[in-house]
Image: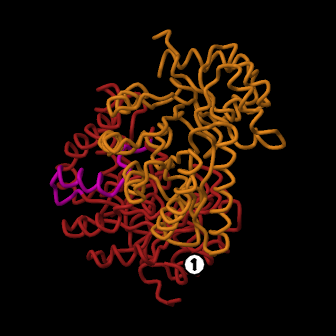
Chain colours: A red, B orange
Amino acid sequence: MSDDFSKLCVHTITTKPWEIEVAMDKYAEAGIGGITVWRRWLEGRDIAKVGDRLRERNLEIVSLCRGGFFPHLSESDRLHAIDENKVIIDEAAAVGAPLVVLVCGADPGQPLEESRKQIVDGIAEIAPYAESSGVKLAIEPLHPMYADSRSAINTMQQANDAAEQIDSDFVGVAVDVYHLWWDPDLQTEIARCGSMDKIFAYHICDWKTPTVDLLLDRGLMGEGCIDIRRIRGWVEDAGFTGYNEVEIFSNIYWDQDQDAFLDKIVNAYKKFS
Amino acid sequence: MSDDFSKLCVHTITTKPWEIEVAMDKYAEAGIGGITVWRRWLEGRDIAKVGDRLRERNLEIVSLCRGGFFPHLSESDRLHAIDENKVIIDEAAAVGAPLVVLVCGADPGQPLEESRKQIVDGIAEIAPYAESSGVKLAIEPLHPMYADSRSAINTMQQANDAAEQIDSDFVGVAVDVYHLWWDPDLQTEIARCGSMDKIFAYHICDWKTPTVDLLLDRGLMGEGCIDIRRIRGWVEDAGFTGYNEVEIFSNIYWDQDQDAFLDKIVNAYKKFS
């Protein structure tokens, strides 16, 4: 148990029932230092002003979630994805987020190898635009249960390989314990990622037993089987000094009082992260 | 499309609503050559007589499902698992199944490495008993979404490593496309498994998009994103000549007329497997 939670960041999706105007006040009041903004919380708003209001509350904008979804059977869909990702980079620059997290995508109608090639091509295509905008991109490996349609990048090694191949200082990796805790090469590949200076983000939550929904049943830190402290040790040993971002999709928690949930997040962070 | 379905085997769990007395008649009438029996279909029955009745219908008993679940925090639970697996081997011998498929287990309260060690220790412990009973054991790697509590063996490489370490002619691997289709090293590790003469079983079904349940929403061959023919090619290139076992857990199909479902299985097998 540590009282230090200076590295705690919360994703706006984690407290989904709150509008961002509410979330920013609540996070700031709780003494939370970092916020990762999901795009839906920018819709219909003056994006630059949202950024100003976050900074006025001393909330550090850690990243914007999310870009990606590059692979498609049709070339026109792939080109559309490139355009869309440039818009997302613009949004990140406007709000003042230094990083866009990429859920890379997969098309169930084609082999994973083809989707992976389209992912590398797509990121390589937008990397110069990201660099000129001062916005970095993080490839987030997703759990293999999402390999059909959400990401063909399912291990830390695949993310490292893709980032290495793209070879831009603005393209790295987001390590999410939920997606990667089972990965037999996780420790080795985190070290490799660190040696490339490519650990751009670190996301936490927990894997519950049983898990009853493929998407919306993530656990609070300490509720599941992930040894979060051990993985945090690996990313810090690899040189990562950034925020620990709490990203929880949970119908159970979203149905509860969000003030009480935010208290639980801070306490669970201190105790298990 | 091939009319040859001489390699088709169906698991009794696939047509879960049918008692085994019904299933054996239906499979035989459909011209299906192989059956894999799940233990619950032996409960309360004279096991040797079930075997006789299956053979009278010219159904080849491909395997018994399932043993395993070796890892536990407590030693007494681990010892109990050893005893239970010997009972399962006895059942396989009694019904005339040459193989027991192992869902190896995992305890969410301990690291995956510890569960894996307990799996290897457990299988090594029962291997001589299996050999003296003339029953082989197949380590089935399970999808990483089951790593918390069902199996700490989640890739083909881990299964090969475990089988190699145990080093018994009676211990091999069951390749299931549902669990392994995403595995980046699948082709290489299937070849490796074949070179060790350890591909003991081959299970098929499909991964649907979207999949709405972690356990009970498997698809019929052709309904999803798995290139089953390609993986079948890999196992056959690696020397496998056994049955293609259809193992589908599906609330959707179990709610339907099972005669019509069995027709669909045969047709989907011919078209997509």
Q: x, y percentage for residue A119?
A: 29, 42
Residue type highlighted by circle 1:
Ala
In the displayed image of the protein, which residue is found farthest to the right?
A: B44
Q: x, y percentage for residue A123?
A: 25, 46
Residue A266 belongs to the span the image colors magenta: no
For mark 1, what is the residue?
A268
Q: Is residue B208 above or below residue A269?
A: above
Q: In this view, does A154 lie above or below A149?
A: below
Mark 1: secondary structure: helix
Q: Residue at x 47, y 37 (%)?
A: B177
- Front residue of this view, candidates B171 and A237: B171
- Quarter of the image holding residue A193? bottom left
Check the picture and name the quadrant holding the N terminus of chain B.
top left
In the displayed image of the protein, which residue is found farthest to the front?
A: B132
- Front residue of this view, candidates B118 and B107: B118
- Quarter of the image holding residue A131? bottom left
Q: x, y percentage for residue B32?
A: 61, 18
* Visible residue check, residue A19: no
Residue A167 belongs to the span the image colors magenta: yes
* Visible residue check, residue A25: yes
Q: Mark 1 lies on which chain?
A: A
Q: In this view, does B58 lie to the left or right of A62?
A: right
Q: x, y percentage for residue B83?
A: 67, 62
The range drawn in magenta is: A150-171
